[in-house]
Image (cartoon, grey):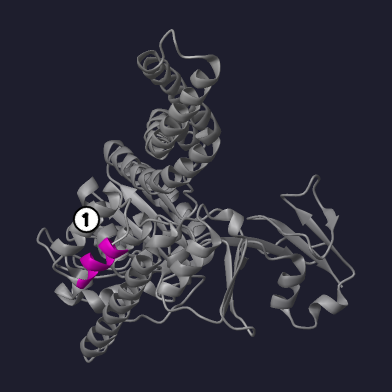
């Protein structure tokens, strides 16, 4: 066992030894790997942890696949997608899912004051200005759904295939339970998919591009990636990532679903926002702490080295003067005095040099610990938690249909445009729907495969500087723009 095992590693090891399930052991092992020593003497230890990580991940994945196959023997709960997109309405029992479905779509669903009224998926079509959005109410999830309770495996499998999620929450605990069940099966709702590209490499091994975005060394990142069983992979990182985010992005089972969390009070809304921010802050703080310690040690090393040397040299001179006083008397001539002084200084230097490393490490650790809180607070104050993937909102009853309908349309990242022939009125009854970021060229191809070739010009009303402005083929329209195609 290498020396310099830190407190965090020791605590993680205790968690591993106390863990009862494979999932708990895997979490503890990941923590042990993150806090394991990075010096050369710890290479064997890190290899052992990496090997165990791979074994537990394969074991868990194999069991989940078996359970999925075993439980899928019954009828499928998957619903064929229709309309512009499918939004799954999920939540705990009696959180108002059926009521929302009835209000938003007009379909007749059974609503009772007792739990588990909905025993099969209920489907309705939401109309937003002519755009049809499919809402699917999923039977209630409960604590333990991810382990198979209450038909949970099939329900979560169905949720994974949706385009987005609507989650009504009465309390913070409602949200925590749903979040835990989704996280357990790698469905992420509070994280956006990282900007990362991973392709099979023809050169063999793992190649990393963009390691500056990671706060660990390239070697540590490569070890971490290999521990997940990845090989022959070229990975291009395009934004700052933690190792956890990197692992999630490389896991084919991970799904990122945009989510709207509907709260029934402002208080619950704020509680959920604070809770999510605390999760993100803790994740970032852990990564920033390790990074900041490394930076501080480099920054403070020379200063500490100088102060320790000064301290030891002062001790040497004081001890030397005391010893010389004992050894030298009035009869000692100059040459004898110098010889005695050189001998004593040599002996003291050997002793003080042996103390230098201990004193240096002790002082450096003290300086880092003293400076770390202010450095961390400064860095964390600049961190902006990305809420692009989920939104938390309280909507009063009187505005529910209007506001929630608009929120659900926005959740799907869609753009609705209206077309018009030259000299005629726009067709507001049948809007054209496409994904955000599509261009005029893309719209023309949707209308007809040869349409774009015949285009003379295109004019847009809405998001342009002036009404009816001519635009190029690569122009990207905004929601509810009016587009005139001239051929």
Q: Residue furthest right?
A: 456
Q: Could you say where residue 451 lies in the image, as x and y percent from the top left? A: 80, 78
The magenta region covers 22-29
Residue 56 within the segment the image draws in magenta: no
Relative placement, left or right, of 455 versus 361 is: right
Can the viewer see residue 239? no
Q: Name the residue: 31% across, 43% down.
A: 275
Circle 1 sits on which residue?
95
Q: Quadrant of the C terminus?
A: bottom right
Return the x and y of residue 97 as percentages of the image width and height. 26, 60
One can see residue 402 in this view: yes
User: Among all residues in the image, which is located at the extreme bottom?
Assistant: 73
Of 37 and 467, nearer the camera is: 37
Image height of 163 relative to 100, above or below? below
Q: Residue at x 44, y 61 (%)?
A: 40
Neighbours of disc 1 within 10 Å: few (<14), some (14-19), many (20+): many
Q: Residue furthest left?
A: 114
For the point 35% across and 57% down, which residue is it? 36
Quarter placement of the N terminus? bottom left
Seen from the viewer's position, the closer of residues 75 and 385 is 385
Lateral position of residue 191 relative to residue 194, left or right:
left
| Residue 456 sits above or below residue 307 on the image | below
Magenta stretch, main secondary structure class:
helix
Across and down, in percent, residue 262 comes to 33, 50
């Amino acid at each position: 066992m290498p020396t310099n095992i830190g407190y965090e590693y020791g605590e993680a090891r205790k968690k591993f030894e106390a863990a009862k399930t494979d999932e708990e052991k895997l979490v503890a092992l990941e923590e042990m790997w993150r806090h394991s020593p990075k010096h050369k003497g710890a290479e064997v230890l890190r290899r052992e942890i990496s090997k165990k990580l791979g074994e537990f991940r394969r074991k868990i994945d194999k069991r989940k696949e078996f359970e999925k196959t075993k439980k899928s023997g019954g009828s499928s709960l998957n619903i064929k997608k229709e309309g512009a997109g499918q939004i799954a309405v999920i939540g705990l029992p009696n959180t108002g899912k059926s009521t929302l479905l009835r209000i938003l779509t007009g379909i007749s669903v059974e609503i009772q004051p007792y739990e588990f009224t909905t025993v099969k998926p209920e489907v309705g079509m939401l109309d937003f200005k002519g755009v049809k959005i499919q809402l699917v109410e999923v039977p209630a999830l409960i604590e333990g759904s991810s382990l198979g309770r209450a038909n949970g495996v099939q329900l979560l499998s169905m949720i994974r295939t949706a385009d987005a999620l609507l989650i009504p929450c009465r309390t913070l605990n409602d949200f925590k339970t749903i979040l835990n069940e989704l996280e357990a099966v790698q469905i992420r709702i509070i994280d956006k998919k990282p900007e990362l590209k991973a392709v099979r490499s023809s050169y063999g091994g793992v190649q990393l591009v963009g390691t500056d975005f990671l706060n660990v060394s390239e070697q540590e990142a490569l070890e971490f990636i290999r521990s997940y069983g990845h090989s022959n992979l070229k990975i291009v990182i395009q934004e700052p990532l933690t190792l956890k985010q990197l692992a999630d992005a490389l896991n084919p089972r991970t799904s990122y679903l945009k989510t709207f969390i509907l709260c029934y009070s402002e208080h619950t809304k704020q509680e959920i926002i604070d809770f999510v921010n605390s999760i993100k802050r803790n994740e970032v703080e852990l990564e920033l702490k390790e990074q900041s310690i490394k930076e501080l040690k480099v920054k403070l090393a020379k200063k500490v080295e100088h102060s320790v040397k000064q301290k030891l040299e002062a001790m040497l001179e004081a001890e030397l003067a005391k010893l010389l006083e004992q050894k030298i008397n009035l009869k000692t001539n100059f040459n004898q005095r110098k010889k005695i002084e050189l001998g004593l200084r040599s002996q003291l230097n050997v002793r003080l040099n042996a103390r230098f490393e201990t004193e240096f490490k002790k002082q450096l650790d003290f300086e880092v610990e003293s400076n770390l809180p202010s450095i961390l607070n400064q860095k964390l104050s600049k961190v902006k938690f990305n809420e692009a993937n989920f939104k938390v909102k309280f909507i009063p009853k009187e505005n529910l249909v209007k506001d929630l309908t608009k929120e659900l349309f926005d959740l799907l990242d869609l753009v609705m445009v209206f077309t018009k022939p030259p000299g005629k009125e726009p067709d507001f009854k049948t809007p054209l729907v496409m994904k955000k970021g599509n261009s005029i060229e893309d719209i023309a191809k949707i209308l007809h495969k040869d349409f774009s070739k015949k285009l003379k010009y295109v004019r847009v009303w809405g998001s342009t500087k002036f009404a009816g402005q001519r635009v190029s083929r690569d122009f990207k329209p905004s929601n509810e723009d009016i587009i005139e195609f001239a051929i």
